[in-house]
Amino acid sequence: MAYGVVLRPDAQTSRSLVELSHAIGDGHEPLMLLGEDAPPHVSVLHVDCAEDQAAAIVAATAAHRGRTFPVKIIGLLYSVVPPGDHYVPTGGYYFGLEVIRSPVLDALHQQFLSLGHQPLGLVGEDYRPHITLGMTAAPPSRPPLSKVPTGVVHVTMTSGPVGPFGTFPHLLD
């Protein structure tokens, strides 16, 4: 089973990111847009593990509950995802917010990587923190740049099973 550790923004920031996701992806054959079953998040690590091994990940996240972590958004990125991708088997168009790989984010990534589970996605030197806004089958639009957030956002840690397209429909509260 795929399981992940993620950092979530507060409710107000999440609402604005959901709105931005839909402003970019609506009408462009959406495969995944942010919403209730796809909350905005910065992934720390996704792993493939047996269901009974997820308890170790939950226990490791418990030490971070209640802490806030600053993440700095530095821009909007669009990318073509070729067919065969782990998260998007059909391929499509990714759009999201790039986040600086700070020493704090890197340390969290390394901590969870050291638990020894089989990692999924880009890890280690290739770890690229970001907030996925959506995936579409047709090229997405470009929003007014004034709607694209920049600067520091404060996030909190949680975990849960990874859903379709790298979403988290059932995060622990």
Image (cartoon, rainbow, N blue to C red):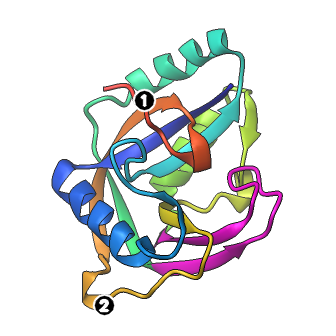
- Residue nearer the viewer, 109 or 36: 36
- Is residue 165 shown to the viewer in this render? yes
Give how far apart the Cα atoms at labels 2 and 1 are: 32 Å
Question: Residue 133: image x %, image y %?
Answer: 45, 64
Provide the secondary structure element on which disc 1 rests.
Answer: loop
Q: Which residue is mark 2?
A: 144
Q: Quadrant of the N terminus?
A: top right
Query: Mark 1 sits on what residue?
Result: 170
Q: Position of residue 2 (x, y in %)?
A: 66, 31
Label 1 amino acid?
His
Q: Amino acid at mark 2?
A: Pro
Against 48, is 16 above or below? below
Indicate the position of residue 140 as horizontal and vertical percent values: 51, 80
Does 84 appear in magenta? yes
Quadrant for residue 92, please give it.
bottom right
Quarter in which the C terminus is drawn: top left
Q: Position of residue 12 (x, y in %)?
A: 16, 56
Q: Residues within 10 Å of mark 2 (few under 14, many from 20)?
A: few
* Residue at 74% from the left image edge and 27% from the top image edge: 116
Pointer 2 with pointer 1, Cβ within 8 A: no
Helix, strand or loop for disc 2: loop
Mark 1 Cα-neighbour bin, 10 Å: few <14, some 14–19, many ≥20: some
Query: Which contiguous range is marked in magenta?
Result: 76-98
Queried whether the magenta region covers residue 167, the answer comes back as no
What residue is at 35 percent from the left and 68 percent from the top?
22
**Which sits earlier in the primary sequence, circle 2 or circle 1?**
2
